[in-house]
Amino acid sequence: MYGLKFSKEDHLAVINLLLSVLHIPDLDPWLTNRTACSIRDLLRKRDLLTRDDLHIEWRPLYELYEKLFYSPNEALGLVHYPK
């Protein structure tokens, strides 16, 4: 058996799908949090994936980070992020 009972190719496909969900503009912060937690859970088992298996572009994730944590709307109380 492989990890969460699906093949390595399916494992990589689910991770890539969830990463593409994070690239959706104006995604609800709650959904962003749930998607990121799912990605974290899938990447947690380091013995299942190697560095050569998965290539993640850092720029979209960095832009998401900047949008979420350095938003000018948060100081005004217009954005509430889940904990």
Image (cartoon, grey):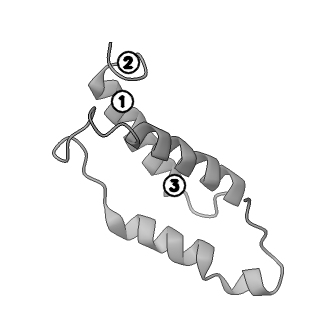
Q: Which mark is residue 22?
A: 3
Q: CA distance from mark 3 to mark 2?
A: 23 Å
Residue placed under numbered mark 2 in the picture: 6
Q: CA distance from mark 1 to mark 3?
A: 17 Å
Q: Which mark is residue 44?
A: none
- The answer to whether residue 66 is above or below residue 52 is below
Tell me the amino acid under the disc marked 1.
His
Please tell me how many numbered marks the rendered image carries.
3
Horizontal relation, residue 9 to residue 41: left or right: left
- SS type, badge 1: helix
Query: Mark 1 or mark 3: which comes first in sequence?
Result: 1
- SS type, badge 2: loop
Residue found farthest to the right = 77
Q: Which mark is residue 11?
A: 1
Task: Report the residue at 63% width, 47% height from top.
Answer: 34
- The answer to whether residue 71 is above or below residue 81 is below
Residue 47 percent coordinates (x, y): 26, 35
Tell me the amino acid under the disc marked 3.
Leu
Assess disc 3: are there few (<14), some (14-19) or many (≥20) residues with their C-alpha within 10 Å of its C-alpha.
Answer: some
The quadrant where residue 27 appears: bottom right
Horizontal relation, residue 74 to residue 42: left or right: right
Horizontal relation, residue 74 to residue 35: left or right: right
Task: Report the residue at 53% width, 41% height from top.
Answer: 38
Instruction: Kindly indicate whether the residue at mark 1 contacts the one at mark 2 (C-beta within 8 angstroms).
Output: yes
